[in-house]
């Protein structure tokens, strides 16, 4: 937890020299009781919660924008995006800024847990169920760390998938 | 693959039915190609992009023979390859139709060639047009020099068709110079046509290079298929055997024997450039030669060195530096022997060549010193000039003895010559200064990548925001900080200065754009047989480069419209007692915070009745026509699909153009004004804000959001009182402002803010005007007025209504900029 705290304050730049390792590294974070993982290589920065400027006419999961070093970055609340119950923000909430096709997007998550190596051999495709819940649509695989299973997310899909907007209202 | 199939299915029918006058189809097809370029396989993408360029040329320049030929070639090519809609990958290489493929080893050389040639061709075109009514030998020399440079470099790179064409044009110009030929309108047309073809070819090559380079160091490009044989024939047929001779010489770059006229031709600037260029060439040649010793595969290096030396030889011959020419020829011969395998590339021959290179280098070094004096020959002291104008030598000598003032001033003070004589003399003196005369503008500039400039621009924006963050920091609010305030003021001064310099770096004069219009008017005037006097003023007005790009298309459409619809035919003008030559006046000027670009014609004026009737029949008018002002009716011409012309001419009348005008100008947050007087002409004014990036804005709170309105949209602020408001329907409220009824837009309602203020009465009224409509906005609180650096909204947030961008406030908060026009459009009818 200490290491993560440090990351929150400092900028977290992905180390390009470490490409191979970076490919297997995942940032784990919590939404409610579930643990999700994002590939480190897509993450630009992790920052603590800050004042959000609302933007009108947006779907409920777009919370607004923040200014990060002169860049205006839209924020997406992953809880709402995944159809989970909304929760009031406190100082444990974090913003994970990811880069998708050269655009920056911030994900609001409950807490950031740790960075973990997950070998490709330990990642299994998500079994496809007939009635997928919202969060399941955005899974790129299931990663095994010891006995636990972490849900690995597909960033591109979370950001660009439009279908969700229709279903999110349900 | 499917998407490609679909694209071809869309494109081919349109392509085969396309006729060159059909501008709508040209636009549609061009857009279709551009929208789909990503899906095309890389090996065939270029041919479609070439096609798009041809369409673009049709739109911009209208029809001409070369374009048509080019189009037919491409069409055939595409039909051959994809005609059967065989969606399977077609591996057939298209190179077999290309005249030459060239291996590019050095991006830089090609890119700078493209850039430079582009500049050269621009100036050449302008000068050719000037040449038509002013056969100034200096001008011909200038054109000749530019053409020569293009030829030289293209031959160096190996672009044979460009080399051949520019060579022929150069020869033609040479004959003009030696007065072997006289300037006439046919000749001008040939020169223009040649310039066009050259610039098309270079454009194609530029695009191709962009696709093929892709980070690679060496790649092949092929020259475009442009058939300029008919032009070459025209050039040859300009009746003189001399030209044949020159062409037959083929490979040799023209070595012009130094003659009397050469002195005027060479400026020290050129010599310096020659030396700089040649030094580079020598360095690389030396490098290649040194490689010879340790390499088994030498052909490439030999060729490389040979080309470099050949260029030096050619250039030094042009300048008349015989000894350099000789030495490079010797080195060239040695290399030729190696190339043909007659000599071995052993230690001995390499040393010999290196010796020659050293010799050339020394010779050039010596040149540097005298070269700097040479150019001044043309410059004559003012006294001498005045003497020629009839001022006596004694007077001038007397004045010269006083010398601590400027000669001109003294002469005026002593009453010997009048002010106007001096300025006339100074003017003619200036013309003698190399570089100062209009005909040979040389800029003191360096090339900077636009990306870098944009980045700098962004950074300056951030700097200003950061500065505000520091100075307005809450930590120091209310403290008495004399020293700090002084330093802060100083800092602000510096950042403003940096900002204005950065902005000015992106500003370029409208001259280039306006010069292009000269060509357009000339062509249209000939084609439609309407004699036109084209007046240009304010070409030195500077504008953001990006903005100039955006207004190029609108300007073409407006001028085309003015000539096609505005000006009457020769006969009609005579009937109404007008001069048979129509006037089109293009003007640019600063007007407050805006730049106004005006296109005025002295034609028949807009036909209000016809426009109205037409707009009604197209269902464009939704209110009672009686209530419309003429200016509202005139604006109808900017509606999509609008056209009053009964017959569609090949130039205009399909109603595509003016719609583009409005779209582009709105994108720039500009406005269009129209004035028209029946029978006397019409005037269209494009009002473009000086800068897109920084605006004066009023910021305010709406719910938890900070929003801003452009100051120029705001008319006044009001404190609301109960009696001001009248409810006219559900959610419909108006205010009575000194007798004027103004609709109210409550931003809290508009943006569905739930936790904001409950009553209108607790807010503040901001009266705005956009699109000619006034409206009263209700916001929570006014924060202040400041300059804002506008940023685009992130892509994800573009759905947001009536928000045109965002900006950062001093405290780091994001502020949304309201687009007043869009807001009014959204809310009111």
Image (cartoon, coloured by chain):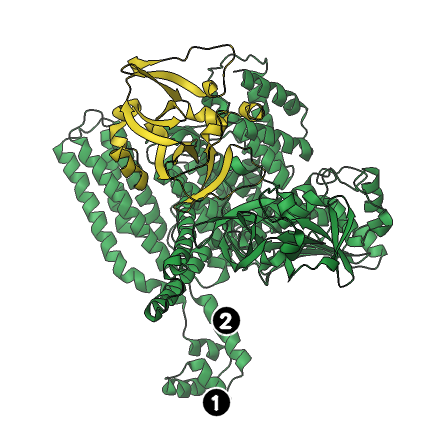
Chain colours: A yellow, B green
Q: Is residue A48 above or below residue B372?
A: above
Secondary structure found at label 2: helix
Q: Is residue B257 above or below residue B87?
A: below
Image coordinates of residue B492 in percent, x first then y, are: 40, 63
Mark 2 Cα shell of 10 Å, populated few (<14), some (14-19), many (≥20): few
Identify the chain of the residue marked 2, using the numbered disc in the image. B
Observer-nearest of B500 and B406: B500
Q: Earlier in the sequence, mark 2 or mark 1?
A: 1
Chain letter, disc 1 residue: B
| Circles 2 and 1: CB atoms closer than 8 Å | no
Q: What residue did someone put label 2 on?
A: B427
Where residue B548 appears, as percent x and y from the top left, is 55, 50
Residue B270, position in %: x, y?
A: 36, 55
Q: Is residue B573 visible?
A: yes
Q: Name the one closer to the observer, B239 or A109.
A: A109
Write the residue at 46% across / 28% down: A79
Q: Is residue B295 above or below residue B765?
A: above
Dot 1 corresponds to which residue?
B414
Give the residue displayed 20% in from the left and 48% down from the top.
B359
Label drawn at residue B365:
none
Give the image location of residue B50, x and y in percent.
53, 30
Position of residue B593 in the picture relative to residue A101 (left or right):
right
Judged left or right of residue B258, residue B171 is right
Report the Cα–Cα distance between label 2 and label 1: 21 Å
Question: Residue at left 45%, top 60%?
Answer: B500
Q: Residue furthest left?
A: B347
Residue at x-position 39% and y-position 54%: B466
């Amino acid at each position: 937890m200490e290491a993560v705290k440090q990351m929150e304050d400092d900028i977290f730049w992905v180390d390009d020299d470490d490409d191979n390792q970076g490919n297997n590294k995942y940032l784990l974070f919590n939404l409610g009781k579930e643990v999700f993982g994002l590939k480190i290589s897509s993450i630009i920065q992790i920052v603590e919660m800050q004042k959000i400027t609302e933007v009108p006419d947006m779907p409920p999961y777009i919370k607004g924008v923040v200014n990060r070093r002169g860049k205006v970055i839209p924020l997406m609340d992953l809880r709402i995006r995944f159809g989970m119950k909304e929760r009031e923000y406190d100082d444990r909430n974090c913003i994970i800024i990811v880069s998708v096709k050269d655009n920056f997007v911030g994900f609001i998550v409950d807490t950031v847990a740790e960075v973990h190596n997950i070998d490709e051999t330990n990642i299994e495709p998500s079994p496809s169920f007939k009635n997928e819940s919202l969060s399941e649509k955005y899974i790129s695989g299931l990663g095994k760390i010891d006995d636990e299973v972490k849900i690995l997310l597909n960033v591109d899909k979370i950001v660009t998938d439009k279908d969700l907007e229709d279903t999110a209202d349900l | 693959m499917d998407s490609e199939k679909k694209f071809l299915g869309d494109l081919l029918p349109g392509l085969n039915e396309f006729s060159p006058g059909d501008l709508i189809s040209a636009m549609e097809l061009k857009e279709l190609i551009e929208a789909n370029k990503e899906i095309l396989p890389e090996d065939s993408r270029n041919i479609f992009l070439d096609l798009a360029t041809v369409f673009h040329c049709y739109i911009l320049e209208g029809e001409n023979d070369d374009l048509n030929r080019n189009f037919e070639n491409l069409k055939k090519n595409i039909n051959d390859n994809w005609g059967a809609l065989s969606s399977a990958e077609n591996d057939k290489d298209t190179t077999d139709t290309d005249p030459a493929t060239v291996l590019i080893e050095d991006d830089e050389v090609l890119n700078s060639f493209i850039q430079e040639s582009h500049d050269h061709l621009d100036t050449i075109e302008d000068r050719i047009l000037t040449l038509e009514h002013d056969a100034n030998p200096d001008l011909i020399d200038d054109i000749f020099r530019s053409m020569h440079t293009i030829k030289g470099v293209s031959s160096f790179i190996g672009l044979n068709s460009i080399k051949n064409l520019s060579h022929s044009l150069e020869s033609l110009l040479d004959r003009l110079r030696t007065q072997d030929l006289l300037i006439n309108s046919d000749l001008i047309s040939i020169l223009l046509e040649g310039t066009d073809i050259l610039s098309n070819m270079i454009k194609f090559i530029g695009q191709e290079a962009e696709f093929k380079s892709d980070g690679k160091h060496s790649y092949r490009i092929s020259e475009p298929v442009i058939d300029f044989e008919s032009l070459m024939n025209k050039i040859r047929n300009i009746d003189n055997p001399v030209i044949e001779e020159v062409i037959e010489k083929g490979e040799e770059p023209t070595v012009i024997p130094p003659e009397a006229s050469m002195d005027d031709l060479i400026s020290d600037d050129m010599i310096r450039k020659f030396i700089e260029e040649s030094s580079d060439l020598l360095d690389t040649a030396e490098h290649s030669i040194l490689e010879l010793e340790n390499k088994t595969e030498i052909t490439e290096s030999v060729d490389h060195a040979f080309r470099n030396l050949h260029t030096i030889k050619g250039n030094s011959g042009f300048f008349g530096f015989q000894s350099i020419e000789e030495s490079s020829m010797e080195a060239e011969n040695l290399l030729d022997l190696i190339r043909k395998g007659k000599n071995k590339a052993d230690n001995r021959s390499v040393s010999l060549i290196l010796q020659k290179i050293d010799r050339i280098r020394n010779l050039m070094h010596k040149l540097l010193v005298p070269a700097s004096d040479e150019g001044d020959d043309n410059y004559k002291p003012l006294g001498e000039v005045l003497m020629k104008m009839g001022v006596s030598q004694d007077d001038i000598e007397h004045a010269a003895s006083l010398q601590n003032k400027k000669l001109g001033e003294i002469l005026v003070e002593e009453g010997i010559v009048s002010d106007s004589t001096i300025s006339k003399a100074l003017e003619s003196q200036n013309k003698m200064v190399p570089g100062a005369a209009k005909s040979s503008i040389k800029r003191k500039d360096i090339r900077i990548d636009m990306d870098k400039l944009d980045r700098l621009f962004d950074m300056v924006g951030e700097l200003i925001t950061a500065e505000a963050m520091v100075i307005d920091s809450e930590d120091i609010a209310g403290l008495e900080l004399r020293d700090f305030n002084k330093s802060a003021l100083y800092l602000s001064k510096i950042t403003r200065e940096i900002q204005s310099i950065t902005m000015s770096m992106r500003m370029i004069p409208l001259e280039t754009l306006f010069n292009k219009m000269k060509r357009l008017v000339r062509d249209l005037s000939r084609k439609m047989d309407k004699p036109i006097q084209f007046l240009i003023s304010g070409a030195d007005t500077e504008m953001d480069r990006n903005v100039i790009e955006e207004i190029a298309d609108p300007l073409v459409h407006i001028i085309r419209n003015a000539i096609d619809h505005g000006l009457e035919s020769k006969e009609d003008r005579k009937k109404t007692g007008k001069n048979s030559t129509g006037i089109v006046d293009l003007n640019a000027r600063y007007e407050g915070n805006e730049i106004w670009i005006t296109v005025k014609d002295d034609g028949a004026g807009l036909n209000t009745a016809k426009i109205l009737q037409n707009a009604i029949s197209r269902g464009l008018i939704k209110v009672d026509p009686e209530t419309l002002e003429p200016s509202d009716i005139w604006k109808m011409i900017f509606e999509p699909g609008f056209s009053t012309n009964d017959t569609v001419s090949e130039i205009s009348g399909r109603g595509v153009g003016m719609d583009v005008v409005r779209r582009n100008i709105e994108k720039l947050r500009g406005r269009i004004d129209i004035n028209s007087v029946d029978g006397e002409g019409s005037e269209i004014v494009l009002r473009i804000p000086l800068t897109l990036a920084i605006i004066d804005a009023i910021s305010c709170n709406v719910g938890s959001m900070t929003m801003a309105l452009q100051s120029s949209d705001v008319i006044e602020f009001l404190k609301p009182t109960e009696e001001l408001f009248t409810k006219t329907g559900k959610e419909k409220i108006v205010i009575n402002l000194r007798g004027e009824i103004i609709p109210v837009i409550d931003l809290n309602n508009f943006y569905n803010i739930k936790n904001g203020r409950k009553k209108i009465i607790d807010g503040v009224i901001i009266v705005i005007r956009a699109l000619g409509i006034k409206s009263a906005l209700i916001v929570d609180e006014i924060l202040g007025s400041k300059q804002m650096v506008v940023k685009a909204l992130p892509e994800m947030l573009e759905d947001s209504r009536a928000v045109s961008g965002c900006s950062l406030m001093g405290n780091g908060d994001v502020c949304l900029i309201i687009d007043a026009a869009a807001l009014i459009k959204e809310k009111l009818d």
